Amino acid sequence: MEPIKAGLAASTEPLLRLRGITKRYGGVRALEEVDLAVRAGRIHAILGENGAGKSSLIKCIAGVVQPDAGTMSLDGAAVRFPSPAAANAAGVVCIFQELSLIPDLSVADNIMISNPPRRFGMIDGRAQRRMAEAALARAGAGNIHPLELVKNLPLSRRQLVEIAKALARNPRLLILDEATSALTAADVETVFRVLKALRAQGLALLYISHRMDEIAELADDCSVFRNGRHVATFPAGTKSDGEVIAMMIGREYSHVFPPKPAPVPTGPTPTLAVRDLSWGETLAGISFEVRAGEIVGLGGLDGQGQRELLLALFGVLRGVTGQVVIEGRPVSIGGPGDAKAPANGMALIPEDRKTEGLMLPMSVGENLCFASLERLSRGGVLDKAAERRAVGEMVKLLAVKTASPDTPVGALSGGNQQKVVVAKWLMNSPRIILLNDPTRGIDVGTKQEMYRLLRKLADEGAAILLYSTDYAELIGCCDRVLVLYGGAVRRELAGEALTESALVASALNVEAVAGEAGLTSAATP
Amino acid sequence: MTMRIDPADPAPPGLFKRLDPAVLTAFGCIVALLLVGSLYSTSFLSPGYLLQQLQVGAFLAMAATGMMIVILLGQIDLSVPWLVTVGGMMSTAAAGYGPWGAAFAIPAGVLCGVVFGLVNGVGVAYLRIPSMIFTLGINAVAQGLMILRTGGSAPQDMATPAMHGLATGHALAGIPNAVWIWIVVGAVTVFVLRRTTFGRSVYGIGNREAAAYLSGINTRRIVLLAFALSGGLSAFAGVLLAGYSDKAYQGMGDPYLLPAIAAVVLGGTSILGGRGSYLGTTAGVILITLLQSILSVMQIAEAGRQIIYGVVIVAMLLLYGRGPRVGS
């Protein structure tokens, strides 16, 4: 495509080489025996769906976490980075997805924050400004004033400052994790020009992005990851979108899902109907319906508004516009207290059980009762007998493995903690159940129990809205899946059309791939 | 992961296992203090002396009870000093309005404290201003209002006989009335913390406000109520104190802020919220009261007493107040 890509010799020893890198979090394998080579003067794209191991990979390379096994070598010499600072010192610098700038400091302060030039023990402001200017110029952002406060810059300019900050550390390997997700089209062009210039200067770049078009324009090499394993590396442009997507999926199905019932007939009044729901720039006019007995999935890439949609329905977000209709009644939900009231009958299983779902030092029993204190009390006084009964029922229903209801919930395993979060809401007999990635980080056995439970609840008449980052889960569990992209419902998949390739293609907003059968032949993007 | 003792645990596996080590330490310190005191004078162990200490401690206990509820939420109430004074001055002021005023002197004083507490609660829960700064501001406002009312001198109004009786009398079984009040307030507090939705919510919010909010608990109303309770209890301490010395005076609440916080923390309540028992606060109040008494018997000057307080609190915080280990 471009002459420069072939310009630098591909036969030289790679700058960074990984051999057998393995990383586990508890029982979850994030990376398994990963081998990877990154060459100087090349832009190397990393592809993979949610949870494929991309983030774990760059965290291992950048010294944020330590791999459990495997070796890493830089320029042929074995290296080990106990901290990000050690990685920086060796010339490995990472720009993470979340911005790391301090808003109330100047651009120059931010760029030089880890190692400001010093004179007599104090920061040498003039030298710092000079160095920051040089870094900004290299990042193609020479028009940003180094003494401007970061908080006064628009988001896309901040991203350029972030790149300048990385360049000020003189990297040999620059890692960009979704670095363009916040940028406007014009800024993306600037960044691309900068990245190509850096490539010409002989830097190695690891580029992680979900935007297929960006990768096509920028990358020299592509590596595909799946389930923590490195699947293949190939020169960019030698595979079609369809082939790449086929590599990204094709997983072994390790879960067993309960059978799906026949589609729920389109009744006159859905349990939950949402019309034109918007919130700031995150949710852009979402409309859908969920009927009693249905499990509707929310799919798409991470961060396309799925979480915000659930929070908006539960009344947590302020300034939401649009209409929510529950069982035919338009409702206005002012907060979680409103949402769980018997008239609305909603429940939200939040994303992070440790900070949003549970009070870890408190007992299993107390945690179970938190959402139903009104039901378990009279005049504000708790009915201990009713409480014990309800707790016992829930522990039994979900088979929570706990020594006693008085055990602190923090002492339980992750899967059992998650069961407590779910049980806490079931105690309230909800009719609408919103779940925010409920099986993240829990073991396979508990996952399967959870799938069976969800199906059982749906069969008993609940309307369930399930957000999951696990595509297999969406396919196996849901009757229909709404794929979100940029805060809007991009596609609705159901029945035969609900396949992994269709999910991935709509999540990436790629039109080309129609179905599993089309994969091999769909060579032209 | 270390096991934590849960204050609302319904089925205790055994008294010693159930007690927080901080509570045991506090009771141990009480015994040690009494032994040290008895070296100076054998009267330290006499029932008369002990009851007198409990009577004086009851005033502190009222303020510490309110403080504990607020600290359990992970907040703090620094308006205690002048809300104590508000309680004292407003009740004696009501007493100046003839027999009807005298009859309502105690509720009037407490009610004024509740009003200030509600303002604290609105500021912290609804305006989202950090309690450390907001309650400090309300303390200054209360001080200004009291000086405005009295012209900066001690008011002439006297405490009513009822107030005097509550604070100094011995109506039942030779035990001071103030101690009975302490027992009643303590029993109600234990009930509220352990057996009501309010108490359960207080512990929940102190542990993880986001989780409590997402459970549909009206967290703002709970915080508002807790500050109102704290204000009312501080003012009630002021009412008793005015009854004890027969009148209210400027700065009468000043010596109560540090001891109230210290009693709560020494009793094992986490300064970060969510954990602590009323038994511990009781032990903390007794410990502080005895410490004060013994330091004055040993004729240590006020300055020395302040230094020793501070050191004791910091030492206890080092032992218990730092929260769970990172990553546990």
Image (cartoon, coloured by chain):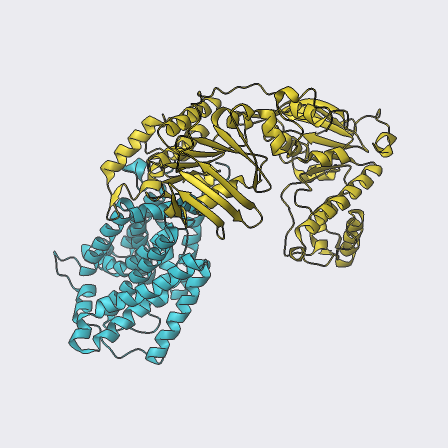
Chain colours: A yellow, B cyan
**Can residue B274 be seen?**
no
Q: Going 66% across and 35% down the picture, which residue do you hit?
A: A210
Q: Going 66% across and 42% down the picture, which residue do you hit?
A: A181
Q: Going 78% across and 40% down the picture, which residue do you hit?
A: A195
Figure quadrant of residue A229: top right
Of the 4 image quadrants, the one containing the N terminus of chain B is top left
| Residue B225 position within the rendered picture, expressed as x and y whole percent measured from the top left | 33, 56
Q: Going 63% across and 36% down the picture, which residue do you hit?
A: A64
Figure quadrant of residue A175: top right
Of B248 and A134, nearer the camera is A134
Q: Is residue B243 above or below residue A66?
A: below
| Residue A356 position within the rendered picture, expressed as x and y whole percent measured from the top left | 45, 41
**Can residue B284 be seen?**
yes
Of A51 and B59, nearer the camera is A51
Horizontal side of A13 relative to B227 (left or right) equals: right
Q: Is residue A250 above or below residue A458?
A: above
Residue pushed farthest bottom?
A: B151
